[in-house]
Amino acid sequence: MSQFDPTLFTILVVEDHKFSRQALIGMLVRSGYENVLSAKDGQEAIDKCNRNHIDLIITDINMPKVNGLELIKSIRQASTQIANHTSILAVTTLSDTSTISACMTLEVDAFLVKPISVKCVQEKIQSAVCAPKTLFQQHLYEAVDTHISLSVPSEEKDSIEKIRQIQSEVHELTTLSDLRDGMTLVYDINANNGGCLLKAGTVLNEKLIKRLFELSSIIDFKTLHVRVDQKQLAV
């Protein structure tokens, strides 16, 4: 998309707290967005997705009836009437790493970190709607647990051993800027509180790398170890 015109887009705001919902809608209107719909929970959002053309969704996660993860999963699995690649921004406090990890698996297009500013909203929306509409992890959607308190069994040791058995080069990186599309994580990437954001064995793509940059303030790492397959080295 060569030119971005906010008046041409319809945005759906999903937030159960009335004050927060109205505040976000106000930010969007002041930013030039004329077509803004709202929903107070995930079920109402699904109903509006099935009756309206939606270009982008901004959703909170912890909501009654149908939560934000359930909403995102429904959209990504094409269970609603809108395109499964519709741009989605997840509103978060960055405190629940399990939820953040689930959002990354479901390929949200950006995180909006509370408290939200007008400038941040403008930048994240423009970046999301102008990005290629490509989904890389559709084979992982079904396994995503949409409960807010997610629990994933620890298989770190087994995963690391399987990765080490593959004959390819392992690189030690010191910055996130060294990450490239197609690299495979040798170890988990964890948050400062110990929660796992991306598990060992994850193959990185452009969306995941962008999300890691957004989360850089909460990532606990001194070095990153990634595997680069021989076919990638030859490129």
Image (tube, rainbow, N blue to C red):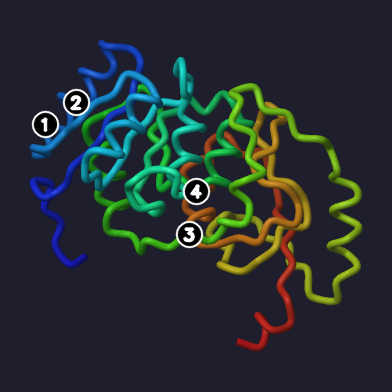
Identify the mark nearer the N-term, 3 or 2: 2
- Left or right of 45? Residue 156 is right
Mark 4: amino acid: Gln
Q: Nearer the viewer, residue 159 or 72?
A: 72
Q: Nearer the viewer, residue 211 or 192?
A: 211
- Left or right of 23? Residue 89 is right
Identify the mark nearer the N-term, 1 or 3: 1
Mark 2: amino acid: Ile
Q: CA distance from mark 1 to mark 2?
A: 6 Å
Mark 3: amino acid: Leu
- Disc 4 target residue: 77
Q: Which quadrant of the figure has residue 224? A: bottom right
Q: CA distance from mark 3 to mark 2?
A: 28 Å
- Disc 3 target residue: 135
Question: Residue 9: horizontal and vertical position, in percent?
Answer: 16, 47
Mark 1: amino acid: Val
State whether residue 11 is above or below residue 26. below
SS at mark 4? loop
Q: CA distance from mark 4 to mark 1?
A: 30 Å
**Eye-nearest disc, 3 or 2:** 3
State whether residue 109 is above or below residue 194. below
- Disc 2 target residue: 25
Residue at the (74%, 46%) spot, across then down = 188
SS at mark 1? helix
- Disc 1 target residue: 29
Identify the mark nearer the N-term, 4 or 2: 2
Q: Residues within 10 Å of mark 3 (few under 14, many from 20)?
A: some
